[in-house]
Image (cartoon, grey):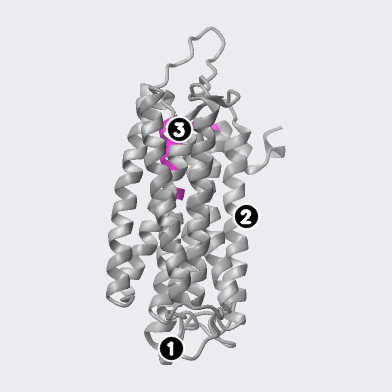
Amino acid sequence: MPNSLNPLEQIARRWQPSAAFVRRAALATVVMAVIIVVTGGAVRLSESGLGCETWPKCTSESLTPTADMGIHGLIEFGNRLLTYVLCAVVGLFIIAARARAPRRRSLTRLGWAQFWLVMSNAVIGGITVLTGLNPYIVSSHFLAATALLTVAVLSWIRASEGDDKPRDLVARPVRQLSWLLVLATAALTLIGTVVTGAGPHAGDARKVHRIPLDWQEITQLHVDFVYIVVGLSVALWFTLRAVKAPAAPRRLVLELFACLAFQGVIGYVQYFLHLPELIVGIHMFGSTLVWICVLRVFLSLRGRGPLPAVPAPAGEQAPAEAPEAATAV
């Protein structure tokens, strides 16, 4: 009986989104995940980390910032409100993925994984405030946001391909090289969070506990891993050319080169200008682009077949998908 159906099932019976709509909804989650990372960095760089002095309220008596809290309260509270926008975008993707026929449980699971990552990161954000911007909690806050971005990118790619068993498009050693690239980039990101926790931008104008390490030495380690990532990217590109890999992965590696070059320039500029807030914020944005490019390169080296065909009513021919829908990213 229709009344016994859950809300998602009822929507699925009344609405059939196109494959392109599902892909756009998935891409929207990627965009929002990037925005969350950048705005979270803006909170820290503007010294607004404790703009709202408690959580989940902004003050012990008010849910919203008060006039005497100034711009810092507005920035911190505005970042909190973005969580609701992110939830709405993730919710749209879950609904679209669930309503699309044939039902793909892998996509809806990825959508729900994003939702729970958003919820967990909101809790970590609250703990960050309640612990007075403990640098280790701040670092875990950023890593949780990166995990959300990872799942969002995977959802975007999966929305463009089928559900066949993954099939390598290149030889296993080439796939292993791409694994090394992913691991090195993940290590680069992790070390970057340590630089954040030890560096001068604590997130608040008051004295805040920092990770007891020399941030300049950690920065040098961060730079060393940049060279490793660049070297692995160059090695992967030449290897893909040598084995005559499909054009898509080679193009994506060139896009990765562009992101790494942009990030490298910004990194040196911020270092020689003694970490101006705006440049550090741009560097954080660049880090999300590099991670997205690395994930796309890695996922482009395997295929999962075309998108499942839409089931046709009895006696009718199934409608053909647009060519774009069947192209794996």
Q: Amino acid at mark 1?
A: Ala
Mark 1 lies on residue = 205
Q: Amino acid at mark 2?
A: Trp
Query: For mark 3, does the 10 Å Cα neighbourhood hold few (<14), some (14 to 19), or many (20 or more) residues?
Result: many
Closer to the eye: label 1 or 3: 3
Q: Position of residue 43 (x, y in %)?
A: 43, 74
Q: Are marks 1 and 3 in contact (CB under 8 Å)?
A: no
Q: What distance separates the C-alpha of mark 2 from that of mark 1? A: 32 Å
Element marked by disc 3: loop
| Mark sitting earlier along the chain (1/3) | 1
Closer to the eye: label 3 or 2: 3
Q: Position of residue 278 (x, y in %)?
A: 30, 72
Mark 3 lies on residue = 300
- Residue at image coords 61%, 81%: 130
Q: Eyeballing the image, is 123 above or below 20?
A: below
Element marked by disc 1: loop
For the N terminus, which image quadrant? top right
* Magenta stretch encompasses residue 199: no
The rendered magenta stretch, by its main secondary structure, is classed as helix
Mark 2 lies on residue = 116
Give the magenta range.
14-30
Q: What distance separates the C-alpha of mark 1 from that of mark 3? A: 45 Å
- Residue at image coords 32%, 42%: 255
Q: Position of residue 20 (x, y in %)?
A: 41, 33
